[in-house]
Image: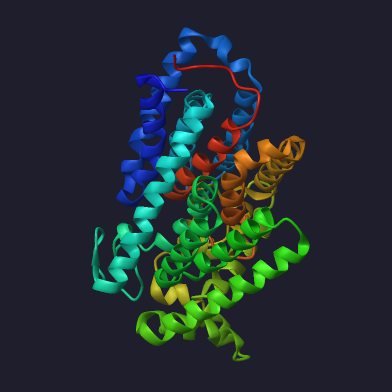
Amino acid sequence: MHLSPRQLAAVLCLWSVLFLLPFGRAAELPIVIGALYAIEACVRDPARLRGAQYRLAFLAFAAYWLPELVSAFDSVAPRKSWTEVATDLRYLPFAVFTVDALVLAAARRQLAWWSALLLLFWILDALAQSAFGVGFGGALESDRVSGIFGDDNLKLGPVLAVLAPITVLVALDRYGRAFALAIWALAALAVLLAGARGGWISFAVVTLALLWRVAASPQRFVGGLLLAGVAAAAAIGTSYQLSERFAARVDRTLAAFDGTRGGLETALAYRASIWQTALDMSLAHPFNGVGVRAFRHDYLDHAAADDQWLALNPEQGAFHAHHWVLEVASETGAFGLACWFALWIVLWRHWRALAREQRHGVAAYSIALLAMLFPLNTHFAFYSSFWSNLYFWLLLVWIAQLPPARERLP
């Protein structure tokens, strides 16, 4: 089925959120455009909101936004918190737009195809930057490959790791296992060279989930796991020998096993201190936290005297918790955690109710969300525009794949 110009434009607007991610707040533009379309459409036809997908999208928004609202009433930084509460309202109409834009299977296939091509371009650009010292994001001047994001915005590794399932599964569906394996290998190399250890862990989660998905039996899963391990070891060994930047990142990671607290802190980039401070904040403000986006404003009151982040930034310390569970707990408290976990229980039940073919349709986004939310890792701030944009994009696209759907955007 061919898409009408209006339907194609809606898919293009949705895809533009990914396309503009490396360019700062530019990714907000398609979100605002989609939100304005949805507001106009709902005013014209409010009955459209009765579908199951819309209700689930509203629930996803509420689980994210209500903790913000509740936390803002006694926030330690009320202006910052209330500003976040107000600006995040944009995700509500954007949720309606996403469901509308992807109501047709052709639209969903088009979005996946364009997204896969975009991510393949990011991968190849990162590898070119590593090989030649320059790419579309500029010259390589930092200690790790930055790709299209540039040296002043080192987010390539975690973003590529989270989004890799889209590219790999599109390649698998269109061109078979050999091509998908090649795409996986290129993505793995790009994530390794990007040097973000959080990205490495996310990509490991993605690899395990992909293997589990394509394996027809436990024996094949174990065999694939062994092959992936051999390939990863070869890539790590080669990169370690050829790239001083990569070798330095590996050495800092291995410091975690020297048996000292200093070695662990070095390996974690001093995040253990942040996590301890975030836990103290959570205990001091158990119900609704210190206030959304107020973490940095209360850090000094909870940090230990020898906290490394106080030496680096005496005025505020760390900016966020670097772990999504601790971020939600410290900024929005037990109420926030309850909302987030309730949402994931609901989404899990919806996923369990899907037929095998329907699970295949959401597989790429399911794995991406799993990697993004994997708790044994470090994370960007979820209550920030960059990471929340990607989170809502993945979550809403996942919801839009679910049956039943009603035709929109004629």
Image check: 17 left or right of 227? Answer: left
Image position, residue 396 (x, y; %): 55, 35
238 vs 205, nearest the viewer: 238
Please identify the quadrant where the C terminus is shown: top left
Seen at 40% across and 87% down, the residue is 241
Viewer-nearest residue: 247 or 379: 247
Residue 203 in view: yes
| Picture mark count | 0
Counting from the top left corner in percent of width and height, residue 243 is at 36, 82
Which is more toward the observer, 114 or 334?
A: 114
Question: What residue appears at the point 50 percent right and 33 percent down from the top-left corner?
Answer: 108
Q: Quadrant of residue 254?
A: bottom right
Position above or below: 240 against 276? below
In the image, residue 107 above or below residue 324: above
Residue 264 position in % (x across, y down):
57, 82
- Residue 225, percent across and down? 66, 69
Q: Is residue 77 above or below residue 126?
A: above
Q: Is residue 158 above or below residue 382?
A: below
Residue drawn at x 76%, y 38% is: 349
Residue 126 falls in image quadrant? bottom left
Residue drawn at point x = 45 percent, y = 62 percent: 187
Q: How is the structure coloured here?
A: rainbow
For the question of whether residue 305 can be seen, the reply is no
* Residue 207 located left or right of residue 24: right
322 with respect to 358 (left or right): left
